[in-house]
Amino acid sequence: MNFVQLDITAIKQSDSQNNAYVLLLNEADGERQLPIVIGWCEARSIAVALEDNEKLDRPLTHDLFKTLGDNFNIVVEKIVIHTLIEGIFHSSFYCKNGITNEIVAIDSRTSDAIAIAIRYGCPIYTYEDILSRAGIILTSGSSDETDYTELNLNEEEDKSANPKDLRNFNLNKLQKMLSIAIQEEDYEQASEIRDEINTRKSK
């Protein structure tokens, strides 16, 4: 299967889950975005690495991983989001031993893999199959500018919201809701609707 390279576009706070964020990955040579829901800790780690303007007293877990890699001649060459099961993305990062040149793929949560990828400056890939199933087509007027400002790096925010039960809507209604969510740039809601549509089509 062919690789598709992804770039980080934005990190936005979830409107429906407490202490959750949506990481938006944009197709490098296209208009599709891949929204991935991640936790607050991972979102903060990713934002810190991207902005590189917050000085921490102690290293974060992903910084520690980078320090260990540097000291033992291990380089992360790429990240691959390789599987999508029931709305959950699975990834691996590929480590190369600088002495033996041996390359090992290590299974990882996608949020951790991306946080590590930023620190190594290595590319992020997925497969065309996953992007065609889970990607969202950007509409004209949607923002394509990198935006990390919606992430509060200093404290966790407690937002309570109860998402609608998508199982109560028919397929035509879901398709309309998906279009509206994309137009309003509510990528997390769009991701949930997309997953529900794909689940029904697979039955």
Image (cartoon, rainbow, N blue to C red):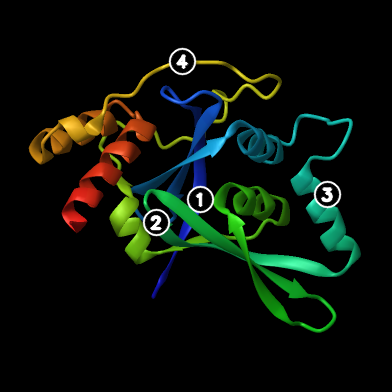
Give the answer, above or below, for where 40 lies relative to 120: above
In percent of width and height, residue 68 lies at 86, 58
- The residue at which mark 2 appears reads as 85
Going from N to C along the chain, the mark reached first, 4 or 2, is: 2
Q: Which mark is residue 64?
A: 3
Counting other residues with Cα less than 10 Å from the Cα at mark 4, is it few (<14), some (14-19), or many (20 or more)? Answer: few
Q: Secondary structure at mark 3?
A: helix
Number of labels in the image equals 4
Label 2: state its secondary structure: strand
Dot 1 or dot 3, earlier in sequence: 1
Residue 157 location, quadrant:
top right
User: Which amino acid type is shown beneath numbered disc 2?
Assistant: Ile
Residue 39 image offset from top left, x and y in percent: 57, 35
- What is the CA distance from the residue labelled 4 to the residue labelled 2? 27 Å
| Earlier residue among tags 4 and 1 | 1
Structural distance between the alpha carbons of marks 2 and 3: 30 Å
Q: How far is the residue under mark 2 from the one under mark 1?
A: 22 Å
Which secondary structure lies at badge 1? strand
Q: Amino acid at mark 3?
A: Leu
- The residue that disc 1 covers is 7
Residue 61 at x, y percent in the picture: 77, 45
Q: Is residue 96 left or right of residue 107?
A: right
The residue identified by callout 4 is 160
Which quadrant would the C terminus be assigned to in this image? bottom left
